[in-house]
Image (cartoon, helix red, strand yellow):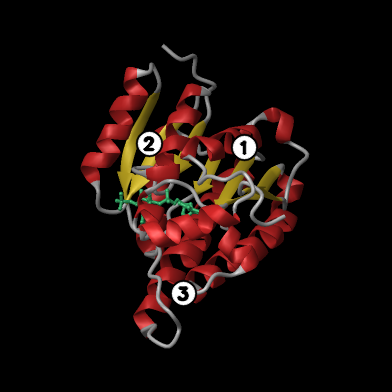
Amino acid sequence: MTETNGKIALVTGGSRGIGRSIAERLAKEGFYVVINYVSNESAAKDVLSAIENAGGKGQIAPFDVSDFDATQKAVEDIVEELGGLHILINNAGITHDTLMLRMKEEDWTNVISVNLNGVFNCTKAVTRIMIKQRYGRIINLTSVVGEMGNSGQTNYAASKAGIIGFTKAAAREMASRSITVNAVSPGFIETDITMALTDEIRKSYIEKIPLGRFGSPKDITGVVAFLTSDEASYITGEVVRVNGGIYT
Ligand code: NAP
């Protein structure tokens, strides 16, 4: 049994990929982990089982982060049931890649709604309880693509660049209440998102990565765990790159 630290962490998009890895790691650190997902209940239950089998604790929480009202209600319910919320990992994200010439308005709107509005919706939802607690850690998953751009990803790059501005502004707003807000910026990581790339595109990316490989979700979780720790209490408004050296 893992010794709990009495703190509650909400991981959006915790059912798969990087979010799953973060959820499992935070549970190992002793957090009670709320695993959010939008549609894939069996994957979320699988993460919860893995956490419980490793001696940790948590629960699943389905809601669509792009839906403002549903998100406020879901977070209210979590806080009422569990009595607090200390860590928010804004990880849920999607891609709808295509060149701008072919990009439909809905490709743009959907990606901005989930990736950027989702970060606002979740952060807004936790602000009241974190201010009351005079404690909180918010970690937003941005992307190397938001920093350097990428052909076929204008929607995704805009959403991820927006997260960086949001992180810096929110960090300034919330610092006086001992709430830190940081971003982690992964490069290309082996998950369902990058599995969708053709072998040719994967090869062309790998050639550009100085460390010569895609990252694994576990390459991200250590940084996230550190940012939730007491040792990181003087870090806020920061963007930590974990990208194999592709953009420095
Ligand atoms: P992934 O494997 O595709 O998983 C996406 C997760 O987000 C799933 O848990 C999914 O839930 C959830 N999700 C999607 N839309 C949602 C919504 N509207 N509401 C709530 N949850 C939603 O993605 P990933 O590759 O791990 O990426 C995680 C984060 O890291 C994203 O923000 C992504 O942009 C960022 N990132 C990834 C990479 C990479 O190379 N993989 C690089 C840089 C940044 P369901 O299971 O229910 O669908």
Above or below for 58 versus 133: above
Amino acid, disc 2: Glu
The image quadrant where one finds the C terminus is: bottom right
Marks 1 and 2, how far apart in space?
A: 29 Å
Residue 81, numbered circle: 2
Residue at position x 61%, y 67% from top? Answer: 161
Please, what secondary structure does the residue beneath circle 3 have? loop
Q: Residues within 10 Å of mark 3 (few under 14, many from 20)?
A: some
133 vs 167, nearest the viewer: 167
Let me know if residue 65 appears in the view: no
Q: How crowded is mark 1: few (under 14 residues within 10 Å), some or many (20 or more)?
A: some
- Residue 129 at what x, y percent from top left? 55, 45
Marks 1 and 3, how far apart in space?
A: 28 Å
Amino acid, disc 3: Gly
Q: Are marks 1 and 2 in contact (CB under 8 Å)?
A: no
Marks 3 and 2, how far apart in space?
A: 43 Å
Of mark 1 and mark 3, the one earlier in the sequence is: 3
60 vs 152, nearest the viewer: 152
Horizontal side, residue 240 vs residue 72: left or right: right
Q: Mark 3 points at which residue?
A: 152
Mark 1 vs ligand 1: CB under 8 Å?
A: no
Q: Mark 1 points at which residue?
A: 223
- Residue lying at the far bottom in this picture: please name it: 101
